[in-house]
Amino acid sequence: MKSACLSAILVAANLAFNLSAAESTPAVNTLTAAEKAAGWKLLFNGQDTTGWHNFKAEGIRPGWKIQDGVLTCTSKTNSGD
């Protein structure tokens, strides 16, 4: 009986810890209200290459792709800076 009660307490404590940790973890690629008010802007929107370009070029070379919300170099020979 004691081990079942102890197990239940440990499970409840673990659940409470995980929930509190999830609430304090900021969302990825977002700004808080305070950061927005301070004038901060995201460099990458997580969806496309808007605002990005290769060095001294108009656009971005095809070696750069957006994969799962991440700007990724997919070709060392066709990406540039």
Image (cartoon, helix red, strand yellow):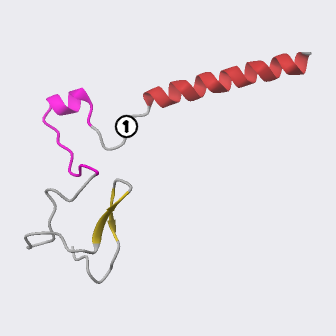
Q: Is residue 54 left or right of residue 68?
A: left
State the residue at coordinates (26%, 81%).
78
For the stretch drawn in magenta, what is the main secondary structure?
A: loop
Residue 48 in the image: above or below residue 55 = above
Residue, disc 1: 27
Which quadrant of the figure contains the N terminus? top right
Q: Is residue 38 magenta?
A: yes
- Residue 73, position in %: x, y? 33, 70
Give the residue displayed 22% in from the left and 77% down from the top.
80
Secondary structure found at label 1: loop
Q: Position of residue 76 (x, y in %)?
A: 32, 80
Number of residue marks: 1
Q: Position of residue 51 (x, y in %)?
A: 13, 57
Residue span colored magenta: 31-46
**Amino acid found under the numbered disc labelled 1:** Ala
Residue 34, image x, y percentages = 22, 27
In the displayed structure, does residue 14 sit left or right of residue 7? Answer: left
Q: Quadrant of residue 15?
A: top right
Q: Does 60 appear above or below 36?
A: below
Please tell me whether residue 44 belongs to the stretch shown in magenta.
yes
